[in-house]
Image: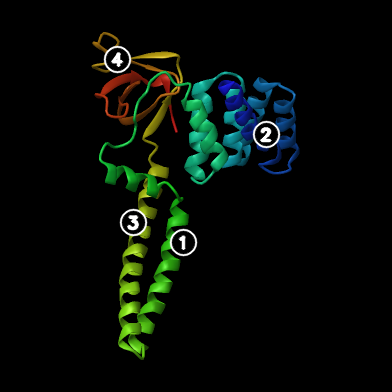
Amino acid sequence: MKQLLIFTALSLLLAPMLVVAGDSTAVTLANRLYASGSYPEAVEHYEQLLLAEGEAPELYYNLGNAYFKENNLGKAILNYERALRLKPDYADAQHNLEFANLKVVDNIDTGDSFFLKKWTQMLIKLRTSNGWFLFGGIVFTLTMISLLLFVFGKTMLVRKSFFYLGVVGFVVSISAVVFSGIRKQQMLNHNEAIVLSGVVVVKSAPDKSGTDLYQLHEGTKVNVISVLGDWYEVRPGSNSVGWVEIKHLEKI
């Protein structure tokens, strides 16, 4: 019964993809293919749309749904992650990603163990780079207004109140600009990747003769540390660093 409820909830989340991403003929055709159950063809059309029209969170979301229906877990998670990279507050993509991650064999915590750093990272990912910059600009404007009210305030209470508001606003606006820079770097430097193969052996060295360290399964997210030839040096969460052939991974 519980599984039935979960799958019902997921189907409701998959439904909105039929009305997003515009009204173009190509999108309409891709959506119709998805609705008719022609998932391989839908995947092909969504991929072509991304190449022709550029990145869009709705297209990545639609593509992730089509891959999920094809039971291609790695590609589904990859595209949900890409949708969220462009639109961090995309609730449908977040819900579908969480559901898809339940099917991942590896139970890896990719976050930082220190709670303050973990919360900060989660906060930074709530907005895009432009979103944080705009937010910082608005807060800075309000800060300037607060300082003017502090200077021209008629009572000590009013002046103190707007002084403290100005100080807080200044700190928040500077933090927002810093977060904007961090998010921009995250967008430019794709250092996270998804395992696309069923089972991948992580090696101690960038060579097939290297010692087997552990295994990773389809859909697992890893941090890419460096590249050497046809190998990625990766760290899955807090696990030890190892090497995986590039062909088994795709960067977000």
Q: CA distance from mark 1 to mark 3?
A: 12 Å
Q: Residue at x 33, y 78 (%)?
A: 161
Left or right of 116 on screen, residue 78? right
Q: Position of residue 48 (x, y in %)?
A: 63, 31
Q: Position of residue 133 (x, y in %)?
A: 43, 59
Q: Secondary structure at mark 1?
A: helix
Taking depth in this image into account, of 146 and 223 the one nearest to the observer is: 146
Q: Residues within 10 Å of mark 1 (few under 14, many from 20)?
A: some
Tell us which disc is closer to us: 3 or 2. Answer: 2
Tell us which disc is closer to us: 4 or 2. Answer: 2
Res 134 label = 1
Q: CA distance from mark 4 to mark 2?
A: 38 Å
Q: CA distance from mark 3 to mark 2?
A: 37 Å
Res 178 label = 3
Q: Secondary structure at mark 3?
A: helix
From the image, tell me which residue sits under label 2.
15
Q: Residues within 10 Å of mark 4 (few under 14, many from 20)?
A: few
Reply above or below: 113 against 218.
Answer: below
Q: Residue furthest bottom?
A: 154
Reply above or below: 131 against 108.
Answer: below
